Amino acid sequence: MPIKAITKVFKEKTGHNVILAFGSTGKHYAQITHGAPFDIFLAADKERPRLLERSGLIVDNSRFTYARGSLILWAPERSFDSLDAAIRNISSNDFVAIANPKLSPYGLAAKQVLQRMGLWLPLQAKIVRGENIAQAFQFVSTGNANVGFIAGSQLTENLLGQANTFWSLPPSLYSPIDQQAVLLKTSKLRALNVSKEFLAFLKSTEGKEIIQKHGYRFP
Amino acid sequence: MILSDQDFTALFVTLKLASISTIILLILGTPLAWWLARSQWRFKYVVEAIIALPLILPPTVLGFYLLISLGPNGPLGSLLKMLGAAPLPFTFIGLVIGSVFYSMPFVVQPLQTAFSGIGQRPLEVAATLGASRLDRFVTIVLPMARPGFITASVLGFAHTLGEFGVVLMIGGNIPGTTQVVSIAIYDHVEALEYSQAHGLAGTLLILSFTLLMIVYGANRRYAVGHP
């Protein structure tokens, strides 16, 4: 996970320890609107940060895109030379794992791709929706789904070694998966300064390099 | 409070799942509980511990193991594959199997307590009067263990109604097949559709309360819950 690598480097550089709380964007959003004592919110989309900005819960002008996700088609038990061949081979007997389009921008992107391919409606009964992209990955990795739409950041060293089982989808097929960060107004005193420093580090070349290394792009 | 078609479908799937699971649990749980109540086997406690496991294990852990073992590469999954059956995850039958594991202790334990409470004496007396085994079970055990059966059915049904973690792991959230109410509510909350979440949660609350009230009300002559 890039955030773990980033906080590690940040600690080495500044001596500040960043405490991470993992969870879905929707859940954290609900917690923040009900007064959760977080300093920074790294969302998996831009909608929730925007909503927080509109409700006046974030520090002015603190919202920015820290990473752009990429979508990958993954079919570990098959081998094709091209994305086209892989898509054409999806049959009505396959379970296709995606993240829930209602909850996850990766799910929405997968839905858009399937719609463009004319597969969304025919595959309705076979599309299994994970609560998030991690569960979509899990459905495929346990062999229960034959095909899955996963995130570029989930391609581990091990998977990268298995050529012809995954294909990057052209960004023109889905709307950008922009992930935004915000500084929350609940951040006070010393934490506020460290938070600002941390967000600056995310924007720095060094921070971006780490993010990119984990399979993300930038707008 | 407006429920969408998909919400109604989820409600229907949930009630179907809870009903079928409860029936299967009573069929499997009755002989199992009877054996547990009567058996003198010294390693009986091992079986009791296995049945009680879902009380302790987080449902997501149980669901994850089911996903792995029922999957095409898992032990149960490959066995089914050899027999020519389709894999179970992401199917309604898969959910029923998950629910049976998950709610087993809630059915077996009240039944076991009820059966133990009857004791040997009434059965021995009936036997000396010439009642057959089946006769004894139907005319003595069943009526005497009635509160236990009521508790077992209510708990089994209610526990399946509120099931979340197991379904989350092996369901795949397919509307009309594996999308149950708890998952639909979760989705509404996550998608910030709070009013729809309230509507569905409220419906489930009223439904569960009414159901429990009817059952307990109809059986208030019996000490339900403490057989």
Image: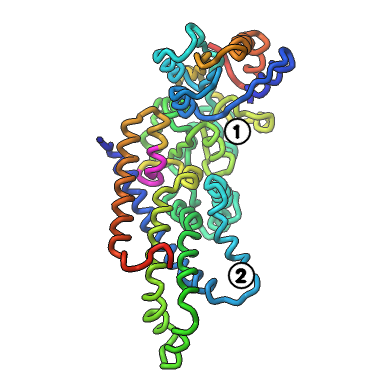
Q: Which residue is mark 2?
A: B44
Mark 2 Cα shell of 10 Å, populated few (<14), some (14-19), many (≥20): few
Which amino acid type is shown beneath numbered disc 2?
A: Lys
Name the residue at 42% across, 31% down. Answer: B190
Horizontal side, residue A3 vs residue A150: left or right: right
Q: Which residue is mark 1?
A: A165
Residue at mark 2 to residue at mark 1: CA–CA distance: 49 Å
Residue drawn 46% across and 54% down?
Answer: B99
Q: How many numbered marks does the figure carry?
A: 2
Residue type of the residue flagged with mark 1: Thr
Q: Position of residue B124 (x, y in %)?
A: 47, 87
Is residue A213 visible in this depiction of the protein? yes
Mark 2 or 1: the one toward you: 2
Is residue A32 a member of the stretch shown in magenta? no
Q: Quarter-wise, where is residue A213 in the image?
A: top right
Q: Where the N terminus of chain A falls, by quadrant?
A: top right
Q: Is residue B184 magenta?
A: yes
Q: Secondary structure at mark 2?
A: helix
Q: Is residue A113 visible?
A: no
Instruction: Point out residue A190 in the picture as x, y percentages from the top left corner.
Output: 62, 12
Task: Give, as a single range, the part of the protein colored magenta.
Answer: B176-185
Q: Of A88 and A100, which appears nearest the observer?
A: A100
In the image as oriented, which residue stretches furthest toward the top? A61
